[in-house]
Image (tube, rainbow, N blue to C red):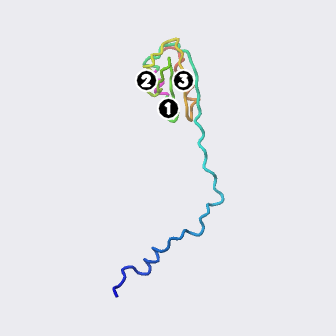
């Protein structure tokens, strides 16, 4: 008779398909934490000056300090991501225009306050 290439050790490994005896989860496990909805803030302001390159640049720099917060500026029904200088300038908001600052994220209140402060600051 020809010799089998599988020895008793190999055959035993292939046949052992039973699950381990203790498959219950540990007793002290906590349920997974549910994600809280992001904080939101919204504030309308009347511009004391035109929203030109300098304030748009300051807004973009400020928005970069809040990486986990979405900051949007709305004027005359148009929206702009506050991180984009060109998008903010393209709003064409002039002195006397109402501008809405919308934020969502971990630091929504702080981001809103910072952008509003830039928008309402007196011209240098």
Mark 3 or 1, which is nearer the eye? 3
Q: Is residue 25 above or below residue 11?
A: above
Query: Residue under circle 2?
Result: 87
The image position of residue 87, as x and y in percent, is 43, 23
SS at circle 2? helix
How packed mark 1 is, by other alpha carbons closer than 10 Å (few <14, some 14-19, many 20 or more), is: few
Q: Nearer the viewer, residue 70 or 115?
A: 70
Instruction: Tell me the residue that label 3 is attached to.
Output: 101
Mark 2 surroundings within 10 Å by alpha-carbon count, few (fewer than 14), some (14 through 19), many (20 or more): some
Decide: is 1 above or below 53.
Answer: below
The residue drawn where x is 49% and y is 27% is 62
Is 5 positioned to the left or the right of 26 in the image? left
Q: Classify mark 3: helix, strand or loop.
A: strand
- Chain part drawn in magenta: 56-62
Mark 3–mark 1 distance (CA, rounded to whole Å): 16 Å
Q: Is residue 59 magenta?
A: yes
Residue at the extreme bottom: 1
- Residue matched to label 1: 65
In the image, which disc is placed on residue 99? none
| Residue at point 48%, 15% (across, down) | 93
Residues at marks 1 and 2, CA–CA distance in whole angstroms: 18 Å
């Amino acid at each position: 008779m020809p010799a089998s290439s599988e020895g008793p050790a190999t055959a035993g490994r292939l046949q052992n398909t039973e699950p381990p005896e203790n498959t219950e989860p540990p007793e002290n496990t906590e349920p997974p934490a549910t994600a809280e909805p992001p904080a939101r803030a919204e504030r309308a302001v009347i511009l004391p000056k035109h929203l030109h390159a300098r304030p748009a640049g300051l807004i973009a720099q400020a928005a970069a300090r809040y990486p986990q917060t979405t900051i949007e500026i709305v004027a005359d029904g148009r929206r702009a991501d506050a991180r984009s200088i060109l998008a903010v300038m393209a709003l064409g908001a002039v002195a006397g225009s109402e501008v809405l600052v919308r934020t969502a994220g971990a630091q929504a209140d702080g981001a809103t306050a910072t952008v509003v402060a830039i928008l309402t600051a007196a011209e240098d």
